[in-house]
Image: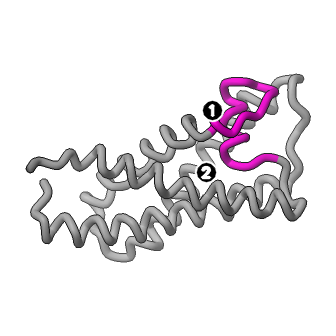
Amino acid sequence: MSFDKPLLIALIGMIAAIPFEIYTRILLSLGIGKYSTYQLSSLIVTIDRPNAILGMVITSLVASVIAVLFYYSLKITGFDFIKIKSIIAGLFGWIFCELFYTWLIEGQKFIAKRPVSDYYLEMTGACIFGLTIGLLFQIFESTSKKAKIK
């Protein structure tokens, strides 16, 4: 049986976004922050109406791209210190997304500026996303060597 490695890596990215969303939802329920990850991502399309379902689709696509890019960068740099590298990759993904959100959403007059706590919420969530990707990649790499997935 042949496996499509990039598709499996994209699936890992989608799965890694789930703990990120859970973390942001928990902190939102505690009164920290304004938007969850899915809500913030949905603002790219809706501009002023956060929607978790739409955000889930957008976040999954972004997380998949980050995971695939990170996986192929690991092919060049190696799989040692994967958890540290994955947290850094998650933070770089967060920086890119925050720049895009700020440019697209907060540059408009449709939505009020987010509180600073929201940035810290998303930044720590990106670390959780990165750590989850690192752990899943570690499992995937050891499993793919045993199964000889190419």
Residue range (magenta): 35-55
What crowding class fits label 1: few (fewer than 14 Cα within 10 Å), some (14-19), or many (20 or more)?
A: some
Residue 144 in picture, x, y percent from top left: 19, 64
Q: Nearer the viewer, residue 122 or 46?
A: 46
Q: Nearer the viewer, residue 25 or 116?
A: 25
Q: Residue at x 38, y 71 (%)?
A: 82
Residue 104 in picture, x, y percent from top left: 71, 28
Say which residue label 1 marks: 54
Say which residue label 2 marks: 94
In space, the residues marked 2 and 1 are separated at their CA atoms by: 19 Å
In the rendered view, would you say 73 is above or below 88? above
| Residue 144 drawn in magenta | no
Q: Residue at x 28, y 45 (%)?
A: 6
Observer-side mark, 2 or 1, equals: 1
Residue projecting furthest to the bottom: 81
Q: Earlier in the sequence, mark 2 or mark 1?
A: 1
Q: How many marks?
A: 2
